[in-house]
Amino acid sequence: MGAVSLENIVKRFGSFTAVERTSLTIPEGTLTTLLGPSGCGKTTTLRMIAGLLDPTEGNIVIGGRSVNDVPIHKRNLGLVFQNYALFPHKTVADNVGFGLRYRNVNRAEIARRVQEALELVQLPHVADRFPKALSGGQQQRIALARAIVIEPDVLLLDEPLSALDANLREDMRVELKRIQERIGVTTVFVTHDQSEALAMSDQIVVMSNGRVEQVGAPEEVYNTPASEFVAKFLGASNILDGRCLSRGPDGAELDVPVFGKVIVPTAKAPHLAGEGAAKLVVRAEKLLLRDSPPEGGAFSAPASVETVDYQGQSVRYFVRSGETQLQAINMIDERPFPVGAQVHLTLRPQDCAALPG
Amino acid sequence: MGWNLIRVYAVLVYLFMFLPVAVVVLLSFNASQFGAFPMAGFSLRWFVALWENDAVMRAFRTSLALGFLCAIISTTLGVLASLALVRYRIPGRNLLTTVLIAPILVPEVVMAVALLLFLNFVGIGRSFIMLLAGHVIFTLPFVILVVQARLVGIRRDVEEAALSLGASPRQTFFAVTLPLLMPAVAAGALFAFTISFDNITGTLFWKPGGVETVPTQIFAMLRHSISPEINALGTVMIVLTVGLPLLGAALARRLAMKSGVSEPR
């Protein structure tokens, strides 16, 4: 077991920089997610930790030991791929036991640990089958068993759920988290799926264009995005371009379209230096439509409903307030507002976040 | 009506192609001294005669040795070359591929003369080793084509998984890549063997004095007379060069089925 540190890592392919100078710590025993769209450098980062790619610059430290010169097969890692990557010519038992054969473990011990691993992934009866006789979800469980049976220092998961269909993906998500917590292995999880990241992670690293945009706990990244990219990538957000007028003890005063002058709590504007261009991030789920203006300190603005996208328990509205179109996702009790309805947009101060412009 | 014509035509084409072969096989069992119909009776005397003919047996042994060595060397080199071309970024990859495949495209006589002239130029005499080298050049492209096609279908992440589990690159090759590659390796080796066993053009140019392979031996025998022994030898050749690949293909299919990889994905 051990923490993973990336120290000033850079990865270039020719003139293309896949990962710009990055330092990152993945605490021991946590599940850290590298989250971002394709091409953001998350898989490149994972492959550098795995030893499948050499960083152009910088150090990779696993469990206090620099592993730059340690080849992949001596790093003691568990690696799980999107397409399972099981050995098609070996039985499930031989697949799972593969890593142990290179670790001087005797046959009886291999058999015992393979069975234990298969039980952990809830597939104790498939040991003699070949991978192609299993479903995608089962294959991925076997791949996971194969990776953890060697008791790796770090478990690396490269979009392990992406090849599964939607229902199975959610089951596996819970399952994966359960197993990770049970064995307590430091885990790096790569995904482009924000709900996977939010549901599973202890720590999320949001990446874009080879740079780390934000590192934080799921709630932190979701509620207080550090950049416009993070705000847009995690959930549906409205970004209002405005100005920061002042920054006082109560918070930062912003002048933005739709809502006019608003005061954003200091905790929600950590990156705002002071006067100057600023953006207000309004989550679609936090922007509520009301019949009447709110009471108390909530921000409010009149608007008209333009599009209604009814989804059963929730509804997605596109509303127009002056020149600005906004998106709102609201839970509903009975029936949604009809198109053309005049409503009052309501937003609690603690539900928005401010970013430098 | 039209279809029937086409059917008849197709049958005639096949007859034209395979009747001579059938005649050779049939006549090899003829008891008569003269290779002609009607047959005088069924006999294995020409096969016995072959067995007792030292020159033929020597040629046969030479051909077998040449074929086996050629298959082993060609397959080994072909697998290594395919690995380099498919798995590594090497400069001039396309050029290299073309050069390796070229012996298929260049007329055999041209290749044969070229190698001979080259050997004369650098002052290396003709020898069994040079003959073998020539055969390897001829058969290597076939091995590379077959193995490369298969290797492209083997996902890189399967090898990466093996590496991550603690197998060294060499162990990964033997535990994962090679077993998955096996059907293509076997097919390539069979190709190499049969092509080498069959080859006459290159062999005529390259063989050292006094050494004959089966095809050159037949060629030499034909100069004197059309002995029924040649029919028997022809039959043995057909069995070897047609039967072996068929056997190999069946074997490869079984291997592939057992390994759970039917076709390269």
Image: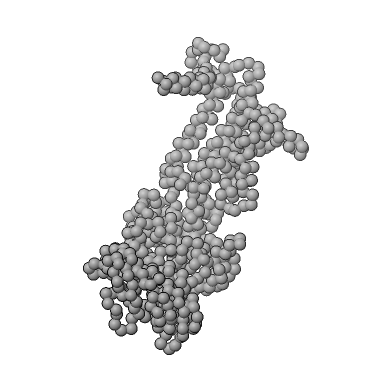
Task: Count the marks.
Answer: 0
Residue in view at x 47 percent, y 36 percent: B249
Vertical placement of residue B135 versus A260, above or below:
above
Q: Can residue B49 be seen by looking at this rendering?
A: no
> At which x and y percent is residue B188?
54, 39
* Residue A122, quarter of picture: bottom left
Q: Can residue B234 be seen by looking at this rendering?
A: yes
Vertical placement of residue B24 versus B206, above or below:
above
Picture colour scheme: one colour
> At which x and y percent is residue A19?
54, 66
Residue in view at x 44 percent, y 46 percent: B261
Nearest the camera: A295 or B131? A295
Residue in view at x 52 percent, y 47 percent: B151
Nearest the camera: B87 or B58? B87
Nearest the camera: A127 or B20? B20
**Residue that lies at the very extreme toward the bottom in this rendered image:** A249
> In the visual, does B20 lie left or right of A353?
right
Vertical placement of residue A357 versus A11, above or below:
below
> In the visual, does B13 lie left or right of A56?
left
